[in-house]
Amino acid sequence: MKAVTYSATGGSDVLTLGEREEPHPGPGEVRVRIHVSGVNPTDWKARRGSGPAELPRPQVPNQDGAGVVDAVGEGVTGFAPGDRVWVWDAAYQRPDGTAQELTVVPERQTVALPDDVSFDEGASFGIPALTAHRALTSYEQAPTELAPGSLEGRTVLVAGGAGAVGHAAIQLAVWAGATVIATVSSHEKAELARAAGAHHVVNYTDPDTAKAIGALAPRGVDIIVDVNVIANAELDVKVAGANATIASYADAPGADSVTIPVRPSMSKNLRWQFVLTYTVAPEAKEAAVRAVAAAAADGALRVGEEDGLPITRFPLAETAAAHDAVEDGVVGKVLIDVI
């Protein structure tokens, strides 16, 4: 079978396309014929590593993907060959990501994909939507698992509403009944955030962003989903309401620490929540998977430019270019057509 692998960390030139022996599912495992592989920032960061380093065995990149069950291992009862599915965390602490024709994952990392939900959408869930779900449910008064109406009466601020996680956060929050404000840096990105379902959009490059957000949320924002808390900490505290949560899921290039306004945070009883989807507690991860699957079945997690997340496509042979596109900050979602 065709697979993209790398045997040492480094630039995208370490990725090579070649033939690899077909994997076989063991007990409790599912083999999926991948149709579409999704690329996230975590994929190129893992590939690049902290410096040149030989790996003990070749690594197939990419955590997210969607396709059709090809075979199941002993004890698997939830899936059968021919089932349409999406997978999550395929390459986390495992050598088999989704940039290959067949990949084997534990049954729990395999999720049914309804017939009316595309492989493009399935390959776009994973890292972005599961991260967004954890950020939205880290609020003290939020449920552990989102559902329609579960955030009714709450106001959510999504910083970076045109990114993949921001897009998923907008869609999940709207599905759960929240009022959503998104911040963006351009008119084009504002249109994408609106297409995703944001009720209000603020350009954070305009003067007095805090005043603009405050006019939309006079009692303050309940949940802030932040792509760059290092730059936004002061603004976040200003616009947060009492007992709000500020959930940060990314760092900024070249920076790894944040200065938190302590006294203002104390006066509002703010919660600062940092999110890494890989290490989320199992029960919270399972709740996220269930909620994302339910939202997808409801048609609430659409992708494509008309739904606020433009798609940039590459064939499997150009996986390196796909990684470069994500690293270079392409707007929208990067997908790889495996089949």
Image (cartoon, rainbow, N blue to C red):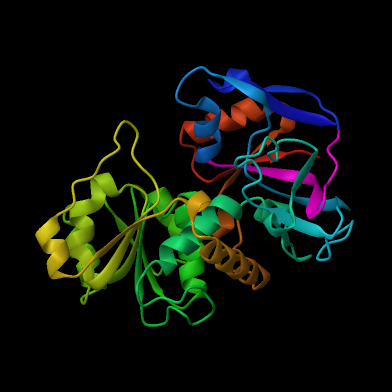
Q: Residue at x 40, y 75 (%)?
A: 142
Q: Residue at x 80, y 48 (%)?
A: 32
User: Where residue 294 appears, x then y in whole percent?
Assistant: 63, 72
User: Where residue 249 appears, x then y in whole percent?
Assistant: 40, 51
- Looking at the rendering, which quadrant does residue 288 occupy? bottom right
Viewport quadrant of the N terminus = top right
Position of residue 102 in the picture relative to residue 269 (left or right): right
- Looking at the rendering, which quadrant does residue 283 occupy? bottom right
User: Where residue 255 appears, x then y in whole percent?
Assistant: 29, 35
User: Where residue 152 appears, x then y in whole percent?
Assistant: 42, 82
Q: Do we see residue 73 in this rendering?
A: yes
Up the image or down, 195 lies above or below 317; here it is below
Residue sticking out furthest to the left:
263
Position of residue 102 in the picture relative to residue 108 (left or right): right
Up the image or down, 196 lies above or below 144; here it is above
Position of residue 132 in the picture relative to residue 205 (left or right): right
Q: How many marks?
A: 0
Q: Do we see residue 205 in this rendering?
A: no
Q: Residue at x 41, y 54 (%)?
A: 275
Viewport quadrant of the C terminus = top right
Of residues 147 and 336, the one drawn nearer to the viewer in this rendering: 147
Highlighted range, magenta: 22-40
**28 is within the stretch colored magenta:** yes
Position of residue 7 in the picture relative to residue 166 (left or right): right
- Looking at the rendering, which quadrant does residue 236 occupy? bottom left
Q: Residue at x 68, y 32 (%)?
A: 60
**179 is within the stretch colored magenta:** no
